[in-house]
Amino acid sequence: MSTVTISIYGAEVKCASCVNLPTSLETKEWLEAALSRKYPNTSLQFRYIDIDQEVMETDKPYVEAIHNDEYFYPLIVIDDEIVAEGNPKLKVICEKIEALLK
């Protein structure tokens, strides 16, 4: 079974339109807890990428797009495909994971 990589791009400071939402890091922790419970026998890898820090070359396109206001953060990317942004919906993320597991 291959590993499903879930990358959460965000920052310590909430975006202006995310006032009542959790921080990006809290979103990562929530997703990790929820998805690990839902898919206990699946190899899931969770990555948190701070868009205000130095990032790996592979993460730069997503970080630049967020800084250019093309996406809201937190930005959720699963296996190099953008799945959610801003206020992610667990149902949409689960649908993507399940499609990858088929």
Image: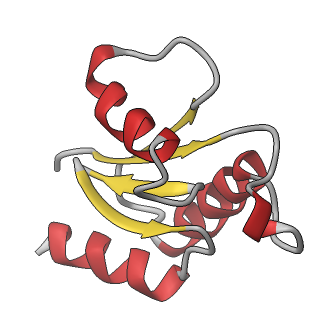
Question: Within the image, what quadrant is residue 39 found in?
Answer: bottom left
Q: Residue at x 61, y 17 (%)?
A: 53
66 in relation to 95, above or below: above
Tell me where residue 15 appears, x and y as whole percent: 73, 55
Q: Is residue 82 left or right of residue 10?
A: left
Report the residue that reaches farthest toward the bottom: 91
Report the residue that reaches farthest toward the front: 68
Q: In this view, does 83 lie to the left or right of 29?
A: left
Q: Is residue 10 left or right of residue 13?
A: left
Q: In which quarter of the image is the C terminus?
A: bottom left
83 in relation to 63, above or below: below
Question: Within the image, what quadrant is residue 96 found in?
Answer: bottom left
Tell me where residue 12 appears, x and y as whole percent: 79, 38
Tell me where residue 77 appears, x and y as whole percent: 36, 54
**Which is more toward the observer, 52 or 100?**
52
How many numbered marks appear?
Answer: 0
11 in relation to 101, above or below: above
Q: Which residue is drawn at 53% across and 66% down?
A: 35
Q: Residue at x 31, y 83 (%)?
A: 95
Q: In this view, does 16 lie to the left or right of 2?
A: right
